[in-house]
Amino acid sequence: MNKFALAKKLLLLVSIVLFASCDKDFNTIGSDIVGQDYFDLEKDSLEVFTNNFLTGPVQTNNLSVNSLGTYVDPKFGRTTSHFVTQGELQNISSIDIKNNPVADSAWVYVPFYYDSDKASDSDGDGIRKFELDSIYGDEGTTDLAQQKFKLKVYENGYFLENYNPENTFGVNRHFSDEKNKIEASMLGADGNGNSVLQGPYLNNSSEASENEAFFFDAKERVIYKTNGAGGYLNADGDVIDDSNIDDRVVKERFPPGIWLNLNAKYFTEKILKAPKDMLSSQNAFKGYFKGLYFQVEALSGNQGALAMLDFSKGYIRVNYKMDSSNTDNDNNPATPIPRVRRFIQIKLGGNSVNFFDTNHALPTNSNRIGLKGGAGSVAHFDLFDLSRVDDNGVPTDLRELREEVAAKNWMINEANLVFYVDKAEMVNSKFVEPNRIYVYDAKNKRPVVDYFTDGSTNSSNPKLSKMGFGGIIEKDAAGHGVKYKIRITDHMKNLIFKDSTNYTLGVSVTENINVSTNAYRKPAPGEQANEIVPLGSVLSPLGTILYKGNIPQPAPNTPGNSPEAMDYKRRLKLEIYYTKPKLD
């Protein structure tokens, strides 16, 4: 997908719950599924009872993909994402630091998602421009360079611990609202490269595009061969004029990504002059250098963009020179000791946390549900009216449906949940709509059975796997979302034919349908500490507004094109297709 347009307390459930009786409208729509002479196919639409709520802060440590940046969606407000990560030394055994090491350059690089088949060099300078993926912003502005924000990089001063004995399996949890822990101890650097608490940021390039006016640049990064003193070389090894780009020799090409030049003096002091035992193991190094913090700040107005990134593919490189020997080999103090060039590389690995600043609220229209990723919102819903249950706690509507299906010898061919998009709201937003939503068992914190029974995969685009289970957006000719449909056939068969328990279901946006695990919600005072939200929702920065279920039927003689009639028509419904014996 090429997408530019890709709260300190947990809020208690904000419920929008209305109850209505089970509505059945039978319409014969075919008779050729299981023997034309014996069966009719009929459709049954059942009401669904919905409950929308904010997730509050969510667990965001060690995600497979993280967001960075800021943008404003007029329907969901501003989302700003920051990121902190530990660092891990690459090739510890080959680290070679001798006398008088001095860094002459240092930079951090994190690649974007991009389409390698769509690269061009329109201006002929030898630097290709790619089509980027998973970068989100105002679709009305196609120029990435116009969507700027402040990006500052600091040394992390807060140790990201793995272990917490109070949590399940001892795994530590970090939440999306905890950036204050990081910012209270973050370190910058003074003019001599010394670490200073909350001092000047490390990405101190004179280029504003690397700090005060950062943007996601679609161009690749090219490093040319030099003579070691800054002069560019041609193919014959001769120093050439700086402006003669065509004759330069390419040393390395980097696909488009975050590229920030860092304070070289800081890395001389912090890394090259570190005690040797601090560079002897990963554990020692993580305790000494606690990683980097990427802090985002919005500029004026609504400009900005947000990217999904795999920081584990990023790294810091420190290029330095040092004496080739610890001794004066010719015993002549006037002869300078030769200097050699080396580099040390630090992976952006280990523990990490994504932080979200949001001001998201639920839709003001009580007939809508808002689904928003990150620290956003999800919805829970019941397929049957829980205000009417029998002595065994079984909803009356479910019991009657079981009895009717058994008495009439019906078979279930298909059952779908159909969620209609509020097009009026989403079309005006100018922002990217989620490609997919996800239905899950909210009670047992796991996918519904239909998720497991659909083994379909898509090797070219894994996010389109499980096509049968569905949840993929259906769009109109203008490219605007119309509806999402999710198959729960096996779930309904279990409810009707196997007397399975009628558990509350949930629905959320998802960044990746292949992710079926959960993240914890940060508990509010008095709330249990094991409430969850689907991890796929946490990974997504996107949101959508859908029609809820159980919307009251309009009064008789209400015009069919009235808002009340249209709301009722587009309400969330469970559609079941049966085959039943013909009576004639």
Image (tube, rainbow, N blue to C red):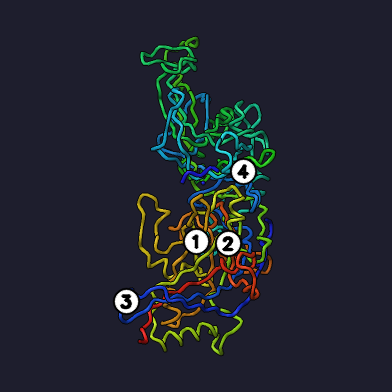
Please tell me which residue is depicted at 58% across the width and 51% down the height of the picture. Answer: 427
Residue 401 in percent (x, y) is at 48, 83
How far is disc 1 from disc 4 in space, using C-alphas?
Answer: 45 Å
How far is disc 1 from disc 2 in space, using C-alphas?
Answer: 9 Å
Q: Disc 3 vs disc 4: which is toward the camera?
A: 3
How far is disc 3 from disc 4 in space, using C-alphas?
Answer: 67 Å
Are discs 3 and 4 less than 8 Å apart at CB?
A: no
* Label 2 residue SS: strand
- Can you tell which mark lies on residue 34? 3
How far is disc 4 from disc 2 in space, using C-alphas?
Answer: 43 Å
Give 181 or 71, whichever is nearer the viewer: 71
- Above or below, comparing residue 31 to residue 402 in the picture: above
Q: Disc 1 vs disc 4: which is toward the camera?
A: 1
Would you name the residue on which mark 1 appears? 484
* Label 4 residue SS: loop
Q: Is residue 530 visible?
A: no
Residue 403 in percent (x, y) is at 46, 87
Identify which amino acid the numbered label 4 is placed on: Gly
Which one is earlier in the sequence, the residue at label 4 or at label 2?
4
Which one is earlier in the sequence, the residue at label 1 or at label 4?
4
Q: Disc 4 vs disc 2: which is toward the camera?
A: 2
How far is disc 2 from disc 3 in space, using C-alphas?
Answer: 35 Å
